Image (cartoon, grey):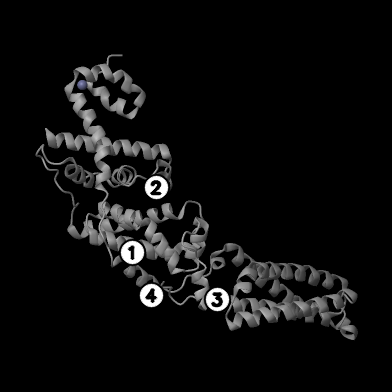
Amino acid sequence: MKFECGDLERALAVPELMQEARDHLKNCPACRSELRLWNEISSAAGALHEDWASPELWPRIKSAIAAEPRPRPVWWSDWKVWALAASIIVAAGLLFWLNRAPGTFGPEQAANRDFLTERALQDVEKNEAAYTQAIDRLYQLAQPRLQNARSPLAVNSREKLILLDSAISDVRTNVQQNRFNASLQMELAALYREKERTLQELVTNDRKN
Amino acid sequence: MVWEIGLPQTFAASVPDQPSEDQLIEDCKRGNIRAYERLYEIHAARMKSIAFHMLGDRSDAEDAVQETFLKVYRSVAGFGGQSSLGTWMYRILLNTCYDQGRKKQRLAEGPVSADIPSRSNVPLKIALDRALSRLNERQRTVFLLFEVEGLKHSEIATILEAPEGTCRSWLFEAKRELKRMLMESRS
Ligand SMILES: [Zn+2]
């Protein structure tokens, strides 16, 4: 292939073609000058870096950041936390409904209304399992923040959660021995709701700060 | 040492002078001003220069850098570490400059572009500077990032969210266009 002036740009794009350009460049001042300019562009470019002192800039940025509201905690933007929170609300709603639904404690059970039927018990246990798992997972996620927390509210919440866990564990043992006892199931549900409320309080407080 | 804005002393003091990238991200997410100061130390000079070439004015460039830091502060909680914090910041900076540049252009009611000096003895740096301001946004950006600020092709690809090969070809187009303008001004 005969290399011509018009081929130079292609050769600049594909370095392998530069080999073919050599002979042409020896005899063509126009292409030599074009190639020199091409190389000069890159070598002169570094000098375009614009540098100047800005002693006021960082203090200005710092003040502007200080005037901003504090960023939300990292987990706040985590969709998993919100998904869990949503599932807790749904499960809590179901549990509440089961505890209140008239069918669960119909007139025929009036004599022993403290005892759940097998079917209702299965529903309660299923929903309770989903509810407690969701709360436990939220609890796990909140653990690092809880442990590092220094505010009086966080310290109180931490202690309260320890007490609640201990109470939940006791009631669960009782429930296992007496699965059909509705008041024990309700007591357990109330403890979980308290745990949820405590975690929610922490979340809300974290958001305010 | 001056620690900051309403954060407990223990927290601020836990930030080492040379934190790892992960540590820096975590500290930024916690709103630790020392982490932002570190980011400023690492990136501000380059950010100022990029913004200057995008906006053509030092004061506007400083405003763009400040705006970028605020945007980083506001949105760092959602930063998932898909790229380095630096490349993410440069992307925000460029978008800020594009926005500011467009506003400025609208105010000036027309594109702001300087004529390239036609005398053949004008220093190449000046002629190149003028020619650079006449490139389109995309070509100017890749040329600035690669040739002026020395970023790697892979970093530029991440900043511009484009394939590396595409960025390389934009760079070639930019240089070809600059060469054409400079040759025209010399003839
Ligand atoms: Zn030729």
Q: Closer to the N terminus: mark 4 or mark 3?
A: 4
Residue in the image at 23% along x and 35% along y:
A40
Pointer 1: what residue?
B66
Residue in the image at 66% along x and 69% along y:
A138
Q: CB of mark 4 within 8 Å of CB of mark 3?
A: no
- The circle on residue B30 is none
Residue at the bottom extreme of this rendering? A111
Nearest the camera: A105 or A115?
A115
Residue in the image at 39% along x and 56% along y:
B42
Residue type marked 4? Ala
Q: CA distance from mark 1 to mark 3?
A: 27 Å
Ligand 1 found in image quarter: top left
Q: Quadrant of residue A81?
A: bottom right
Secondary structure beneath label 1:
helix
Pointer 2: what residue?
B160
Question: Would you say B19 lies left or right of A115 here?
Answer: left
Against B178, residue B105 (above or below) is below
Pointer 4: what residue?
A67
Q: CA distance from mark 4 to mark 3?
A: 19 Å
Pointer 3: what residue?
A206
Secondary structure beneath label 2:
helix
Residue in the image at 56% along x and 79% along y:
A205
Against A17, residue A57 (above or below) is below
Q: Are marks 1 and 3 on the same chain?
A: no
Q: CA distance from mark 4 to mark 1?
A: 13 Å
Residue type marked 2? Leu
Does mark 3's beta carbon lie closer than 8 Å to ligand 1?
no
Q: What is the quadrant of the N terminus of chain A in the image?
A: top left
